[in-house]
Amino acid sequence: MFAQNFNNTAMHIFYGKVALIAYLKTIKTANSTIGFVPTMGALHQGHLALMQRSLKENNDTVVSIFVNPTQFNNPEDLEKYPRTLEEDVKKMRGLSDKIILYAPSVEDIYEGNTISQTFDFDGLENQMEGKFRPGHFNGVGTIVKRLFEIVTPTNAYFGEKDFQQLQIVKKLVEKNNLPVNVIGCPIFREENLLAMSSRNERLSAEERKEASIIYKVITEAKEIFQKGTPEETIKYVEDAFKDNPRFELEYFVIADESTLLPIDHKIIDKKYRAFIAVFVNSIRLIDTISLN
């Protein structure tokens, strides 16, 4: 069905998969392409950039807004995750009235069985986020696979801030032979270079300002890594956050970009990436940077 709350817009808005699937069948042709941007809402400029790219590169663009319960291992985080559908629709309308929005309920997605499938992502799921958020990537795999089955996109767009998730979605597509081209897009940052995130909305103005330390520290870590060792780089980051009691460093990892395995020494011609997770009060922020 179409949403009733936003009937002053030409956007097609669906709450149910049956109606969405039926509509997509009417607009698909043998040669047309569908771009897809899955989100959990509380849209920011990074999300809108993904949509802009999809609009440019495809005949039609579908955006989903769904706060997926199975990828939250912290019930409080799920409860407090911002839900701003009406505001999100306004932002999308400002971008284009050609976006097709799918904003399902938990029931529409999970049909009364809100549990994750179990996936094997060849070990990608056991590092960083997977290590500190048990079951997280089973939840991610479950929802992304389900959304791909519903939307049947040609191209799907994901931000590189969640680089581990991007690699896992690529592995999901590969191992399940899904006919989707997964495209990673650059991180968008606020004026102070804090990585844009829906969780930033939960920060106070002062916290948001001070959170610029995250990007500052990882860019300095990149310089140290290029001249020194992984061990020296990690120590620098740990010491930097020890001096800032407002922030709690959950992890800082230097990993092989393809396997996501942590490294203890550098090998020429390998691509490396730094990953960080930091708590500001109870709000968890992540970032990443290429070290090459």
Image (cartoon, rainbow, N blue to C red):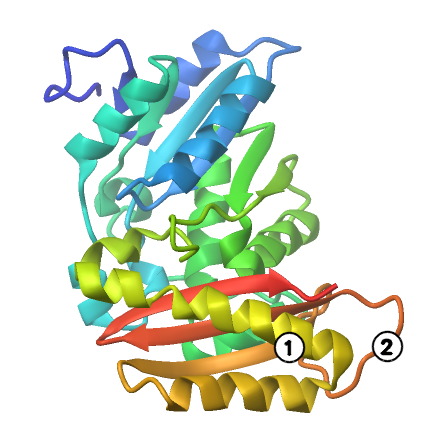
Looking at marks 2 and 1 on the same chain, the residue that comes earlier in the sequence is marked by 1
Amino acid type of the residue that numbered disc 2 sits on in the rendered structure: Ile
Above/below status of 113 relative to 135: above
Residue at x-position 76% and y-position 79%: 227
176 displayed left or right of 61: right
Q: Nearer the viewer, residue 250 or 61?
A: 250
Quarter in which the C terminus is drawn: bottom right
Q: Nearer the viewer, residue 12 or 157?
A: 157
> Residue 128 location, x and y as percent?
52, 75
Mark 2, residue position: 267
Quadrant in the rendering for residue 21: top left
Residue at x-position 54% and y-position 63%: 288
73 displayed left or right of 269: left
260 displayed left or right of 246: right
Alpha carbon separation for disc pair 2 and 1: 13 Å
Quadrant in the rendering for residue 8: top left
Amino acid type of the residue that numbered disc 1 sits on in the rendered structure: Ile
Residue at x-position 48% and y-position 34%: 50
> Farthest residue toward the right?
268
Looking at the image, can residue 123 be seen?
no
- Are dots 2 and 1 in contact, CB under 8 Å? no
Which element type, helix, strand or loop, lies under badge 1? strand
Which element type, helix, strand or loop, lies under badge 2? loop
Above/below status of 238 relative to 275: below
At label 2, counting other C-alpha atoms closer than 10 Å, the crowd grade (few under 14, some 14-19, many 20 or more) is few
> Residue 156 location, x and y as percent?
55, 36
> Residue 186 location, x and y as percent?
57, 45
> Residue 166 location, x and y as percent?
57, 53
Mark 1, residue position: 254
Residue at x-position 47% and y-position 14%: 25
